[in-house]
């Protein structure tokens, strides 16, 4: 029972990570300091996708499923492959979904940058 609960917690954290990846730049409009964790989140996401890395949360999910007595998914199947592709969008639109995610994040960062406080201009010499 404990490992099944742990698996559920890991899945919730993983979905939370993806939600923060998508929306964290907008959160930073209100709480400016959160741009730093969001930059780290986006950097990690790019590294996982570009480097074909196994996310530690995916590894932890597979481990907890095995400890709970479940067979667990194939080690090559990641969180997005299992819970997002084909569920939230058709698998053949993965590249489009990634592009829209990147565009959303870049838009939030652009507006964040444009909304930054401006330093006052020095007075003009007379």
Image: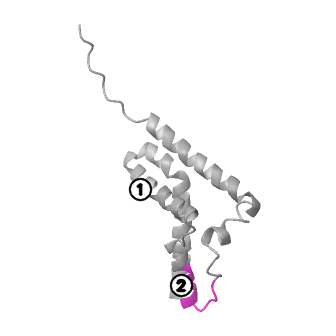
Q: Secondary structure at mark 1?
A: helix
Q: Residue 67's quadrant in the figure?
A: bottom right
Asked if 119 appears above or below 107 in the picture, the reply is: above
x and y, in percent, of residue 123 in the image: 26, 16
Q: Residues within 10 Å of mark 2 (few under 14, many from 20)?
A: some
Residue found at x 54% / y 73%: 54
Q: Secondary structure at mark 2?
A: helix
x and y, in percent, of residue 1 in the image: 54, 89
Label 2–label 1 contact, CB within 8 A = no
The answer to whether residue 71 is magenta is yes
Residue 69 is tagged as: none
How many tags in the picture? 2
Residue found at x 32% / y 29%: 119
**Residue at far left of view:** 126
Q: Residue 52's quadrant in the figure?
A: bottom right
Residue found at x 50% / y 87%: 2
Asked if 119 appears above or below 20 in the picture, the reply is: above
Locate the C terminus and report the quarter of the image it occupies: top left
Marks 2 and 1, how far apart at CA: 27 Å
**Residue at far front of view:** 51
x and y, in percent, of residue 124 in the image: 27, 13
Query: Which residue in the protein does label 2 denote?
Result: 63
Coloration of the structure image: one colour
Mark 2 or mark 1: which comes first in sequence? 1
x and y, in percent, of residue 66 in the image: 57, 89
The answer to whether residue 65 is magenta is yes
Q: Residues within 10 Å of mark 1 (few under 14, many from 20)?
A: some
Residue found at x 67% / y 72%: 82
Asked if 65 appears above or below 107 in the picture, the reply is: below
Which stretch appears magenta?
61-72
Residue 37 is tagged as: 1
């Amino acid at each position: 029972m404990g490992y099944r609960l742990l698996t559920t917690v890991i899945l919730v954290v993983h979905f939370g990570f993806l939600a923060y990846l998508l929306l964290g730049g907008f959160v930073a409009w209100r709480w400016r300091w959160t741009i730093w964790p969001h930059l780290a989140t986006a950097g990690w996401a790019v590294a996982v996708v570009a480097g074909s890395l196994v996310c530690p949360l995916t590894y932890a999910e597979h481990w907890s499923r095995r400890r709970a007595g479940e067979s667990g998914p194939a080690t090559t199947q990641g969180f997005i492959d299992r819970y997002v592709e084909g569920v939230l969008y058709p698998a053949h639109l993965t590249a489009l979904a990634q592009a829209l995610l990147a565009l959303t994040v870049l838009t939030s960062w652009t507006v964040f940058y444009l909304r930054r406080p401006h330093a006052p201009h020095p007075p003009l010499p007379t």
